Image: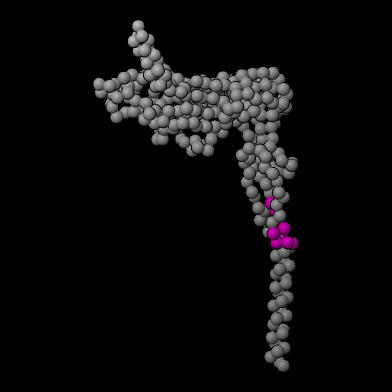
Amino acid sequence: MRGIYFFVFLLISLTASYALDSVVVKLDPNYVETYGEPVYFKICVENIPPRGSLGVPDLYTDANIVDGGCGGVDITVNYSPEYLKPLEFNWSEEFKDIKLKEYRFENGTFYLSILFSNSPKEGNIYLGTLAFIPIKEGETTLNISGVVSSEYGIKYSSKNRYYIDYGKTSQRIAYYPDTKFQGATVVIKGVSNYTNYSTRLEGTFNESDVLDEHSEFKGKILYKIINNITVTPNFNTSKVVVKEVDIIEKSPNITLVINTSVDYRLLIFTFLGSLISGVLFGAVIRWMRIV
């Protein structure tokens, strides 16, 4: 009887020792209070197993195929259009140049897809930042779901299995870690009129309207951005004077334009001055020859 208990205890211990932490897909932060300001959430994937740390997927028969890592992510975030209006999504610096990716807003759903075909990821990754404008007071929840795939295209789920020591007498079955999802709660204690949301700093710059082409609000102005600063040369002091400003908005689209128009009065004065100087110089030379 003691032998049976010992065997069960050993089996449980071995099972626990081979258990893997779940892959986590989450919104960060998971709780936000706002009095009308836009709310921002980072989309993160954590605890991705290292490449080659698992085994041979049961769909493969090549012992050299050892799985792990992350080859791609498909994520869906459901939000309430009654409380939140989509503002923007910005890819993180690490992934903004990857070609095989897309995102869109559609009827209360944000969808994101990205493939790491050339360089599978591992550990923790930050995909990008999602932003909303609060439009109604109350409390609302953002739910996140989706699929995280391994380097060889296997969904991280405890229903999928792989083989350790594939093809050997010591071969045994193990299971992929599950994927857990952590959404977020937004408590809206006040709203503002962001229909014509502007990043105007001091009212001295040109603006252009920006449309969210991926949004269900397509055709409506979601916000404005600064796109031009005009700087005029000061000819009296021969230097360019630019008023110092603090850029507080996130990634404004700013172009510095120098006004290089010609001052014709200055050219005329310069020409007359040169002409008079030439005449005087010639008179002096002739006088010196006479003397």
> Is residue 96 inside the magenta stretch?
no
> Is residue 238 inside the magenta stretch?
yes
Give the residue displayed 73% in from the left and 80% down from the top. Answer: 280
Q: Please indicate, yes or no, whether residue 163 appears anywhere in the rendered image.
A: yes
Give the residue displayed 73% in from the left and 44% down from the top. Answer: 204
Please state, as top left, top right, bottom left or bottom right, where the N terminus lies in the image: top left
Image coordinates of residue 136 in percent, x first then y, are 70, 20
> Which residue is most to the front?
2
Image coordinates of residue 226 in percent, x first then y, are 66, 40
Image coordinates of residue 166 in percent, x first then y, are 28, 23
Q: Tell me where residue 148 sits by quadrant.
A: top left
Please state, as top left, top right, bottom left or bottom right, where the C terminus lies in the image: bottom right
Q: Tell me where residue 30 sits by quadrant.
A: top right
- Given residues 19 and 25, the one toward you in this image is 19
Q: Is residue 126 above or below residue 3?
A: below
- Given residues 6 and 161, the one toward you in this image is 6
Give the residue displayed 53% in from the left and 35% down from the top. Answer: 92
Image coordinates of residue 247 in percent, x first then y, are 67, 42
Q: In the displayed structure, does residue 151 sit left or right of residue 45? A: left
Q: Is residue 173 above or below residue 220?
A: above
Q: In the displayed structure, does residue 287 sit left or right of residue 253? A: right
Q: In the displayed structure, does residue 157 sit left or right of residue 64? A: right
Give the residue displayed 37% in from the left and 26% down from the top. Answer: 54
Q: In the displayed structure, does residue 277 sit left or right of residue 58? A: right
> Which residue is most to the top?
1
Q: Which residues are magenta?
A: 231-239
Q: Is residue 113 above or below residue 235?
A: above
Q: Is residue 260 above or below residue 68?
A: below
Q: Please indicate, yes or no, whether residue 263 appears anywhere in the rendered image.
A: no
